[in-house]
Amino acid sequence: MHQTPPRLPPAKLIFPLLLALLLGLGAFLRFVDLSQPLLDFHPTRQLFSAVKARGMYYQTLPNASFWQKDISYRQWQGEATIEPPVVENIAVFFYKLSGQENTAYPRAVSAAFWLITAVFLFWLARNLVHSTPAALFSVAFFLLTPYSIPASRSFQPDPLMVLFIIIFWWAIQTWSQQWPNPRWHWAILAGLVGGFAIFIKLTAVFFIIGGALGPILAHLNLYKSLKNPQTWLIMLLGVLPAGFYLYDGLYISGVLSQQFGGRFFPGFWIDPYFYLRWLLKVDAVVGLLGLSLALLSWLVFAAKPAKIVLAAPWLGYFIYGLVFPHHISSHDYYSLPLIPLAALSFAPLAREIAVKLEPSLKSRFSWGIFFLLFAFFLTGYASLSYLAIRQADTRPLAQMNAEIGEIIQHQPGILALTEEYGYPLAYYGWQNVSLWPPAATIEDYRQVFARQTKEKAYFLVTDFAELARQPQLLEKLTEYTIFAQSRGYVIYDLKAPRIQPNLPETGLP
């Protein structure tokens, strides 16, 4: 007798489809137009990695011209060593694999890291509040909040760091829930990914420690955990990668010896403007409304274990901001881990809403309407997110910098008043320059001009807003002929001063 195969209940079918829709929308928003130059999101930070990756790559090319190998090597070696060059080596791997240098590859890899993170975030949120709809809401916020789109496809180590942080949170949460008989393989996984997160970027240590303390305090206690050898294994594996890197950088190679100064400013703690600037960066990343709702959800709707689990990384983020006050208040991407933390904090509120809606979703028709409405909402929000972050086409700016490099012929002896610390010129123009200082740092223009222009052939100006703030510099530059000029730049020839006409004697004093 023929048997009709069992059908999946509507809810079990709807939620996988919604997760697939979320991941599809997230992928589309991140993989579209990856060939856009690295000038759309924190160009200085992205081009810092791009310059390093190009220097590594060109040293492996047997047919590259001598001048390209020379300039790319000097640019690479001239950059400071901060984090291990993991993402740069990933980029070089894809450059070699494809046979061309194309920054779309590292951007695509970063986007892929973010999408993988979304899957682990879904598992973690579902584990935390025991609700699949709430976990889907957390993933929606994580993937579609506007700031996450350009940030998650940027050429920098932060998306990879966030991936390892979330895998660690998921692994340590699962491990802590197995007490009093936790499994060794969860301890090993947690230790490894936590260690990799800190290795990728040392600032991850605040989120790793916070992410570990939360589940331990929620499901057991600190004293009992310290008596278990698995806890010590997690700590050992978490410390070793970054520990070896720091030891080598500080005491063997010495490449990190200058990197820990000028980062800790406790004087900021009593400055109210510091907290205002910090709040403005948070607003750029998750929005003040998003932050308020996330904290409300955590404080009011979270059950006690979830409240404790989430409290520790929130505290870790606050301590992190106090330890790095300058960076947290001036670089919004330093708050990037706040996106998954806020997404998880939304889950308790989303669970309450899902519980209220569940009695109304009894038929297939109701589930179908729910799916269509939610899909419509997601698509609309994703479109708005894309429009919110969509920048003007940056290709003309990259082409302008390439044109400048060709006009100057990539020669040394260039002084420049330019944006982004000269990185667009360095990367797209293959042009090294010395930077003219900003107006606030100059007291005697004649003295500074004489010192800065010594042994320089040309003075390049692309930052006309800063030039307008320095009328004395503009007056000085008018004493020289213009070597080349376009809408976006002016190049003054410092070897060719203008000839001043001899005025007739008038006898006047």
Image (cartoon, grey):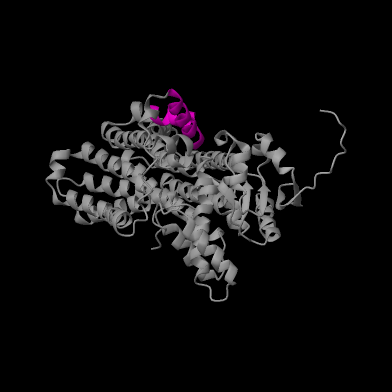
410 vs 310, left or right, is: right
Quadrant in which residue 262 is drawn? top left
Is residue 285 visible in the rendered image? The answer is yes
276 vs 172, left or right, is: right
Instruction: Determine the residue positioned at 14% across, 51% down.
Output: 229
* Residue 29 % position (x, y): 56, 49
Instruction: Determine the residue positioned at 47% across, 42% down.
Output: 333
Q: Nearer the viewer, residue 416 or 10?
A: 416
Quadrant for the N terminus, please. bottom left
* Residue 275 % position (x, y): 43, 27
42 in magenta:
no
Quadrant in which residue 504 is drawn? top right
95 vs 203, left or right, is: right
* Residue 131 % position (x, y): 36, 40
Q: Nearer the viewer, residue 336 or 200?
A: 200
Q: Which residues are magenta?
A: 272-296
